[in-house]
Amino acid sequence: MGNWFERQRNIIDFTLSSLFRRKGKNLSLLLVYTLLVFLLASVMFFTHALRKEASLVLQGAPEMVVQRMAAGRHELVPGRYLKAISGIRGVSAVRGRLWGYYYDAFMSANYTLLVPGSDAPAPGYISIGSGIARSRLAAPGDLISFRSYDGEPMVLMVQEVLSSGSELVSSDLILISEQDFLKLFGMSPGMFTDIVLTVRNSKEVATVAGKVLTLLPDTRPIMKSEILRTYDTIFDWRSGIIVVILSSAVLAFIIFAWDKASGLSAEERKEIGILKAIGWETSDVLLMKFWEGAAVSLTSFLAGVLLAYVHVFFTSVMLFEPVLKGWSTLYPSFRLVPFISPYQVATLFFLTVVPYTVATIVPSWRAATIDPDSVMRS
Amino acid sequence: MRKSTLFFLSLGILAALAAAAWTHAAYQREQGHAALQERADLVKQLDLTDLCLFTEARYTRHPTQADWHAPFQDHPMSLEHFPSGSILAPRKGIGDR
């Protein structure tokens, strides 16, 4: 055992000396490889943590939302729809929601205004999300001016700033009273943005959705399972930027491995020839090449994954932020809970370390099996 | 010091850091439970349907509630011009109903 270990150490000593002789080339290789793993791992960590967070947080989402559609667009729902839906067997509670968007021209930001089902602020008061408080430098007691549907200014007082811990769901929220909401948007009482309903038996949700559609054909029911599924596929590998990042990373890796697999440099071939001539076995040469591949790929893999962890969970994906923010001026400041999937890390390992190590060994095996004399002369 | 010793040492340090990151993640998950619960409670209390990730357009702020034509907004052949629209996959089951 001791002999075996000592032999491995000797080979590693030799391999590292050989790598250091081509310092510039190998260091840049290490850097590019680490960057590649970092990029892939960052995307993986971020999307997985976000999906997991969404699946946990949105468990409390309404069992079903019913929207009314007119000419392919979202339309306000009259109160009689609530009455019709509450008559469906299996429906235990129905509530009309009042919510909408408000574009703040001063901040160039979109807010989501919502009338809570319970504990709504008193007329004249609002509760705002932390994102709004941050961008408008607003605090409880401050006044915020809105422009109502008829162009009249409407001044509301900030009663409360929603906790920063909930920013991932409430950053752009403004909670407002029903009276102020109707006044701001010029909506008639008895009209709602959409309807949320609770079904007594969760197994019957799909049946109830079918009944809603039959009863009110101009509606569109959205079930909680669909809401959860949407976030399960968020940042799907096929969506725009993700596919660009992944394809460029995979392409870079293919070029990388191809360069290794397509052949050795004349210097490397000569080195193998000399080693064989002084008595190294083919297996020793392969072992040396295995350690070479393993040293580069293992170091890059571990460094890349660690950097990605810091990037995603300590700096809140600082490098991806400009893309995630897009044109929006209001962006939640949140720190994701580090949910990491061991399956994803293992996949990344097998997709990066194994092919690279194999790509290093194969051409060396070809060179090592040729007569040392012809290798040195070629 | 032998090069192999240096190699194993650096690998060991990286592996120890990876283990530390793993432990940190487990600790943070434990610690983050209360914050997650707070967000889940708010979602339940206010009947929210979406995460506040992208506020630049209606269909990216509430992807689960978006119109069928939402990604094209004005007409079916108009090009996507919000960056987040190109990151976000469309709602699952879109067009089913």
Image (spheres, coloured by chain):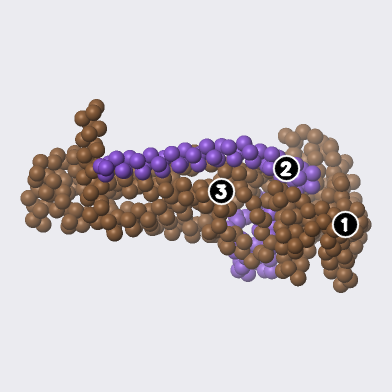
For marks 1 and 3, the one nearer the N-term is 1
Chain A, hue in figure: brown
Using the image, name the chain to which the residue with label 2 belongs.
B
Front one among A332 and B19 = B19
What type is the residue that disc 1 sits on? Answer: Tyr
* Label 3: few (<14), some (14–19) or many (≥20) C-alpha neighbours in 10 Å: many
For marks 3 and 2, give the CA distance: 19 Å
Q: Secondary structure at mark 2?
A: helix
* Label 1: few (<14), some (14–19) or many (≥20) C-alpha neighbours in 10 Å: many
* Residue B36 position in % (x across, y down): 68, 42
* Label 2: few (<14), some (14–19) or many (≥20) C-alpha neighbours in 10 Å: some
What type is the residue that disc 3 sits on? Answer: Phe
List the single residue furthest toward the bottom. Answer: A151
> Which residue bears the numbered disc 1?
A125
Q: Is residue A247 above or below residue A357?
A: below
> Which residue bears the numbered disc 3?
A313
Q: Secondary structure at mark 1?
A: strand
In the rendered view, does A52 fall on the left or right side of A344? right
Image quadrant for the C terminus of chain A? bottom left
Say which mark, if any, is on residue A361: none
* Residue B15 position in % (x across, y down): 41, 40
For marks 2 and 1, give the CA distance: 23 Å
Q: Residue at x 38, y 53 (%)?
A: A33
Q: Quadrant of residue A349?
A: top left
Using the image, name the chain to which the residue with label 1 belongs.
A
Chain B, hue in figure: purple
Q: Residue at x 78, y 63 (%)?
A: A102
> Which residue bears the numbered disc 2?
B38
Image quadrant for the N terminus of chain A? top left
In the rendered image, residues at marks 2 and 1 fall on the same chain: no
Q: Residue at x 23, y 54 (%)?
A: A21
- Cβ atoms at labels 1 and 3 below 8 Å apart: no
